[in-house]
Image: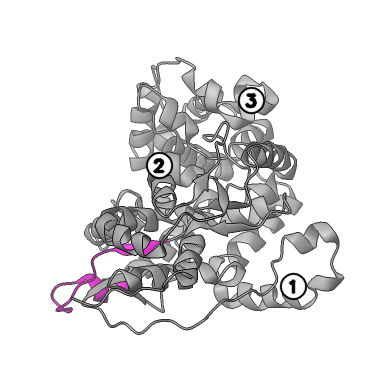
Amino acid sequence: MQTNLANFIKHTPEGEEADTILRSCVHCGFCLATCPTYQLLGDELDSPRGRIYLMKQVLEGQSVTQKTQQHLDRCLTCRACETTCPSGVQYSRLLDIGRGVVHKKVKRKLRERVLRFLLIKILPNRYLFRPLFKLGQLFRPLLPAKLKKSIPSRTLKNTDWPTARHSRRMLLLDGCVQPSFSPNINIATVNVLDRLGISLIKAEKAGCCGALSYHLDAHQESMDQMRRNIDAWWPFIDNRTNSQPIEAIVITASGCGATVKEYGHLLRHDPAYADKAQQISALAKDISEILTLETNALATLFKRLGGKASTKLAFHSPCTLQHGMQIRGSVEKILSNAGFTLCTVKDAHLCCGSAGTYSILQPELSQQLLKQKIAALTSDGPNQLVTANIGCLMHLQSGTSLPVKHWIEILDLTFDAGANPTTSDQ
């Protein structure tokens, strides 16, 4: 693709990156086959190729309208197109740049501005979100049925955080929304790794990974959140101040994992944080990556379970896991090794419609995708649905009466129901 970027962005870091990405696109159209919004709407401008043309026009200085913004807003950023693209077009990075430019040039309607402001200020801030969420739980019995399904009841199994007793240590990203919506996920992760001789610790000052704000065009606020996390984690990583540095940063929400793995790229121009951000990204691991590296130790634990699990599971692989981090088959293999029967899921590459705040900002499209995904997940008769991202979990639960959990919770419950083995520290 030939480009001629406008002077306002031509010689900026964003402009240089956008120019490189635009020139890598060969217009092949393979992306159309895996784009959820194109499948629903049939409009070229609601496909990756069409949006690339729109962003090219914007970056070349042509007029920008609310229609342009609407087509970019409709993108889920699921990155299925990146998996399909034979040319390796880094579409999601171009989209972040394009949306940022359009955000500055097109004023949104008041309702949209207020809603986005509230999402940016409340959801990433656990000190604001947690009390509001607890208030919602308090009045949950009085809420309409549809809204009630969006607010889970309090179902804590155990809030005790195991004492850090092993020589192997890893950090855990606690997150912002997840500890309120589904606190059992991180507790289950701690328990499973404790059985493998790994202690998980939290950096109390770490918070939101920055993904939510970044994808709502609040780039500066998002990068401040990333810097805060780096500052919180660094004392556990720096060899000069810590005689026992941590091995990895464990992340149980794949949406957060995909973002933390990109800290190095997003902060590459910050002289104070660039090197640290690169090290953070290298240490960031989805929990499935950690357990894959512990295959032999897991196999020993699975043998002690003494049989095949009776639960039939359907696994929804979040877009951030399979397309963002390019992790495919790992969770399924772990669950199969644990004895679970996994259902066949048609069109497993397609998004469920959650996509961060997409389900709030684009409810009509989101609900269509949810219905399709629930139909695909339940067609083989599972007893339960499992996933690897809190956003997907909440969204899927709103569309089915089947229980929906994070897969690490299922694994922990399986160990609890068995011999409850522990691995001694070496």
- Quadrant showing the C terminus: bottom left
Residue at label 2?
Answer: 329
Q: Residues within 10 Å of mark 1 (few under 14, many from 20)?
A: some
Give residue 380's quadrant in the image: top right
Q: Give amino acid for label 2.
A: Gly
Query: How many angstroms separate mark 3 from mark 1 (CA)?
Result: 36 Å
Q: Nearer the viewer, mark 2 or mark 3?
A: 2
Q: Which numbered disc covers residue 55?
A: none
The quadrant the N terminus occupies is top left
Magenta stretch?
A: 232-251
- Asked whether residue 6 appears in the rendered view, the answer is no
Q: Which residue is mark 1?
A: 136
* Image location of residue 238, percent across then percent down: 19, 72
Distance between mark 2 and mark 3 Cα atoms: 25 Å
Along the viewing direction, whichever of 291 and 178 lies nearer the viewer = 291
Can residue 264 be seen from the camera position used here? yes
Q: Residue at point 42% right, 67% down? A: 189
In the displayed structure, does residue 122 sit left or right of residue 302? right
Residue with the mark numbered 3:
39
Q: Amino acid at mark 1?
A: Gly
What percent of the width, then of the height, locates residue 125? 55, 71
Answer with mark 3 or mark 1, whichever residue precedes in sequence.
Answer: 3
Q: Are marks 2 and 3 in contact (CB under 8 Å)?
A: no
The tag earlier along the polypeptide, 2 or 3, is 3
